[in-house]
Image (cartoon, rainbow, N blue to C red):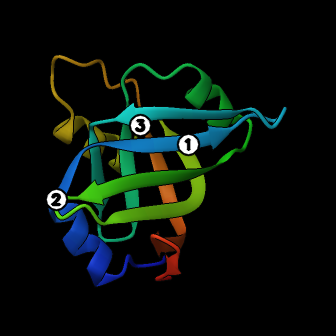
Amino acid sequence: MATLPKIVLDAWENHDEPAILATLSNAKIPNIIYVSCVTIYEDECFVVADNYFDKTQKNIHEGSQGSLLFIDKEGKSYQVKGTLEYHKDGKLFDHMKAANSPKHPGHAAAVLRVKEVYSGAKKLY
């Protein structure tokens, strides 16, 4: 598994909420949503709570890759691109449930497996 670069892990610890998650339908229609329950699992992937997904969930099931965009408190942007998985049970689902607010349903965990990382236009990984 790919490990996120330290600079991204440090930026995530100091990020502003919410982050932005982008997916693409099979018809090549982009979908972009704000996400606030996002965690990093074992320094290798981002785990996003599916609290109210609709088009995002459909796109993941269609095989969409994804991109997560966030900004640190100093205003520096980071974009993580990779493959998406959808978990309704197991360790990644349990990880999401532990981090998700009980006021939200937490239907599933959307997992972004890192393939590329950028800060602005600069490729970090």
Residue under pointer 3: 89
Nearer to us: label 1 or label 3 = 1
Tell me which amino acid carries mark 2.
Lys
Q: Secondary structure at mark 1?
A: strand
Residue density around tag 2, few if under 14, some if 14–19, many if 20 or more, within 10 Å:
some
Rendered view: 65 above or below 2 = above
Task: Give residue 73's mark.
Answer: 2
Instruction: Give the mark nearest the N terminus, 1 or 2.
Output: 1
Left or right of residue 101: residue 108: right
Q: Secondary structure at mark 2?
A: loop
Task: Give the residue displayed 31% in from the left and 73% down from the top.
Answer: 8
Q: Give the camera-side residue of 46 and 7.
A: 7
Task: Give the residue displayed 24% in from the left and 19% down from the top.
Answer: 104
Q: Position of residue 26 (x, y in %)?
A: 81, 35
Task: Give the residue displayed 31% in from the left and 71% down from the top.
Answer: 43
Residue density around tag 3, few if under 14, some if 14–19, many if 20 or more, within 10 Å:
some
**C-beta proximity under 8 Å, tags 2 and 3:** no
Q: Secondary structure at mark 3?
A: loop
Tell me which amino acid carries mark 1.
Ala
Q: Give the camera-side residue of 38 and 123.
A: 123
Rendered view: 23 above or below 55 = below
Res. 90 in view: no
Q: Give the camera-side residue of 107 and 17.
A: 17
Tell me which amino acid carries mark 3.
Asp
Q: Position of residue 97 (x, y in %)?
A: 25, 35
